Image: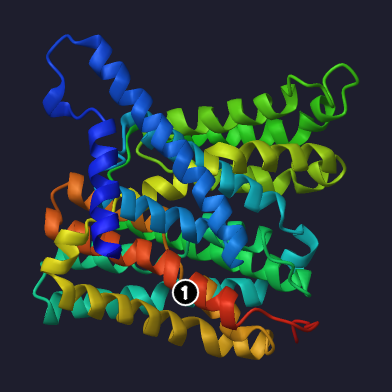
Amino acid sequence: MVMEFTNLTAYFFKLMTPTSNNIKVGDTMAVDLLTQANVLILIIVILLSSLISLRLGLAVAIIELLLGAIFGNLGILQAADWMTILATFGGILLTFMAGTEIDTQVMREKYKESFLIGFLSFLVPFIGVSLFTYFIAGWNTQAALIAGIALSTTSLAVVYSVLLETNLPDANLAKTLLAATFVTDMTTVIVLSILFLKPDLYTLLFVIISVVIVVIAAKYSERIFNHEKLKNKVIEPEIKYIFLILVIFMYFAAIGNGEAVLPAFILGLLMSKQLAKVKNLMVRLRTVAYAVITPVFFIVGGLKISFSLILASLGLFIILFGLKLVTKFIGVYFLANRYIPNGSMYFTLLMSTGLTFGTIASLFGLNAGYIDQVQYSVLIGVVVSSAIIPTFVATKWFLPRHSEDITE
């Protein structure tokens, strides 16, 4: 009965959604209908995700990823170019907001814990996955290295989203977790750049512009946030100003083969003290972000899962997923247990999540010809699954309940 209802629902949405097969060349009206149907279904998924999240008490990011995967595999929702661009912006915006949540004083005090956990969170999975895919799965050297990089990441966007919805008893745990996650992701980008990327003049241009913008914005943005004619206005000039900076990062990262999330996080980190003084602005920014922008990021992430390709390589998918969790556990848990004894498993599970950089590394490998479509689908499946399952387990059974302090 449930299967019949699911099939009927999918059939209904397909009838309501124009497909590319029905579109004639030059038929603008059909294209517009397809776009509008995609927008309609996307908004429905966003609303459903929120309602289900509130009903089940789970992080909305988990539900958005799951519904994205289900609707995508049923053929109900398709990832259009505009959705991909908006999703990219959503990931950068989440990363920026995560940076604003980090207390620089705590980061200086806990730099050893953050660096050690973050670095080993990358290193152990990178070595473990690379060796397995090369010697046992039979992938070539480049493909094995791409797999190691993709499955060693931790999603700063997922971690931040979960923490934002979770009332942890210890703020230092959350701040140390965000800092360690950033170390993992920065290490990922550095290793990917050293092994595969070939920098050119556009890369240098991206770096120079990013540094200049970060320095200027960190120094002078407070004048905009506190300007009497700009602050607390309905048209939200402060938020548009932040969006402009992030889009500039996106643009020059695209032409320079860089990643905009790094300058975005650093900018958020440097602006954290300024934004802490204008809490109303951050509340409004989160409202704008979580209404539409960041849900698109997670839903598009779910759309990248192909159930059919994963089922065709189910054994490899299960092994790689298990290998990521085991190697993350080895790299994170024992240090987390030393420094955060009452939240070590929660810390470890959230450090096991992947999405942003895992997707970036996998897509880079596919576009560059280092991995094929099946390898890409398996890696993406593992990456997105690691954003869902560890998050669910962490928030359901390992959420810290009591006050806890990081030990020296």
Crowding near the residue tagged with mark 1, few <14, some 14–19, many ≥20 C-alpha atoms within 10 Å: many
Q: How is the image coloured?
A: rainbow
> Which quadrant is the N terminus positioned in?
bottom left
Q: Nearer the viewer, residue 385 or 242?
A: 385
> Which quadrant is the C terminus positioned in?
bottom right
Residue 24's spot in the image, x, y percent?
12, 15
Residue found at the far right of this picture: 228
Q: Residue at x 57, y 59 (%)?
A: 53
Q: Nearer the viewer, residue 265 or 84?
A: 84
Residue 130's spot in the image, x, y percent?
24, 74
Badge 1 element: helix
Residue 48's spot in the image, x, y percent?
50, 49
Q: Amino acid at mark 1?
A: Pro
Q: Residue 387 lies in what quarter of the image? A: bottom left
Q: Residue at x 60, y 29 (%)?
A: 243
Q: Is residue 217 above or below residue 63?
A: above
Residue 326's spot in the image, x, y percent?
38, 85
Q: For this view, does 130 lie left or right of residue 218? A: left
Q: Which residue is mark 1?
A: 390
Q: Is residue 178 above or below residue 340?
A: above
Q: Residue at x 55, y 90 (%)?
A: 334
Q: For this view, does 390 lie left or right of residue 315? A: right
Residue 202, can we see it? no
Q: For this view, does 176 lie left or right of residue 187? A: right
